[in-house]
Image: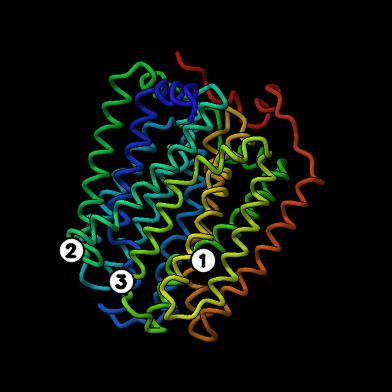
Amino acid sequence: MDRQWWQRLHGFPPLVWIVLVGSFFGRGTYFMVWPFLAILLYEKFQLGAAEIGLILSASAMGAALLGFYVGALSDRYGRRNVLLAGTAINFLAFALLAVAQALPAFILAMTFCSIGRAVWEPPASALIGDLVRDKQSRELALQFRYFLINVGAALGPIIGVWAGLSAQQSTFGLTALSYLLLSLAFLWGFAHTETGRLAHKRRGMSANFRGTLAVLKKDHVFLVVILANVLTLFIYAHMDSSLVQYLTRAQAPSLVQLISSMILVNALTIVLLQFPLLQLMCNIDIKGRIVIGLGVLAAGQVWFALNPVHWFAGWMGATFVVSLAEAVLFPTMSVQIDRLAPDHLRGSYFGASSFYSLGWSAAPLVGGIVIEWWSGPALYWLMFSLCGLVFLLYRLTERLSRPQWHDVEVQAEIGDGVAQPQ
């Protein structure tokens, strides 16, 4: 990257760096064990594919709705309080997951994990927008956060396998510790940095949830984009728990090594190629990048459907193709929401993007049912078809217009908006 890129990176406020570094450590420890959770549930409780899918899906669906509400709350009451609540919930959730022995305790802990993520994600992304005013620097921060998340995802399985921790439940204690440290870092950042003190005062006490809903309802382009991205996450998520279930029941050889290798290929592809790909596409608009990413994602679904169960290298190749799509799509989707969001409703818009979790959380249930009743290849042919539907939804946005939110209209809808720092 050029010198200007490094200057922008160096100029991020301390609180932005806390979000970035916290995302790295939280996701790294998370990936030491979380991808193996389907195996833990299968071996510990002898659950079927549909039962595991139901547990993984149900624990996250309510959290998606909660994330939308939490985003609006962070606009009203400030990012600090909501971020601290999110890190505290994550700490308790992963601590419980580390010691749970009974199935109900597992389900409760996984539900809290999903809730914690829903509470943490929207205000974390919105805080970056609050503190980094330059558009290019803000987009770099959002992309760099996704980059660090995937560095953590790459290192997590390596460290876990090297230390003999993979598929061991107690490793979740390290994730709990990372969120405890992140909570302490936020307390310091909001109290002892100038930007942190200003961000703590930034809130819109007159904003209300009903008014925010009325505003979002008028933004038809945003609503269609949310639906398209929910489906995109649903398609992508079948590379996670659904694929693990498919490979487990098909008795793929060296299963833990195979899953660890796929996670590593996925994360390294993002780490090594995300910024080169985005630089290559810098002259292509947001919608064009998404269409390209969708095409690559569709090709990956075909490969998953056709790949023989025992062909190790084939699974690596299919994972690489889907990871290329991820490298283009996911950072672009974050930038897309940031561009669509007005300043005074940034938390609400990022909160609405938590509906993406509906796609992610529905995938284990749908995937488990399709695998149990039909087959793994049938699931991925279905996902290939859904890629076409997402493409049609993005074509639909070209025919929709967006309202212009003027200050007077915004005040009529939600009050005074977000107050300026005092």
Separation of residues labelled 3 and 2 (CA atoms): 12 Å
- Per the image, the residue denoted by label 2 is 164
Disc number placed over residue 256 in the picture, else none: 3
User: Going by the picture, which residue comes out furthest to the front?
Assistant: 313
Quarter holding the C terminus is top left
Residue name at image x 53 percent, y 32 percent = 139
The location of residue 89, given as percent across then percent down, is 31, 48
User: Going by the picture, which residue comes out furthest to the top?
Assistant: 422
Disc number placed over residue 313 in the picture, else none: none
Give above or below for 318 relative to 76: below
Residue name at image x 48 percent, y 48 percent = 67
Indicate which disc, 3 or 1, sits on the residue closer to the N terminus.
3
Indicate which disc, 1 or 2, sits on the residue closer to the N terminus.
2
Residue name at image x 75 percent, y 37 percent = 402
> Are the residues at dot 3 and dot 1 in contact (C-beta closer than 8 Å)?
no
- Per the image, the residue denoted by label 1 is 362
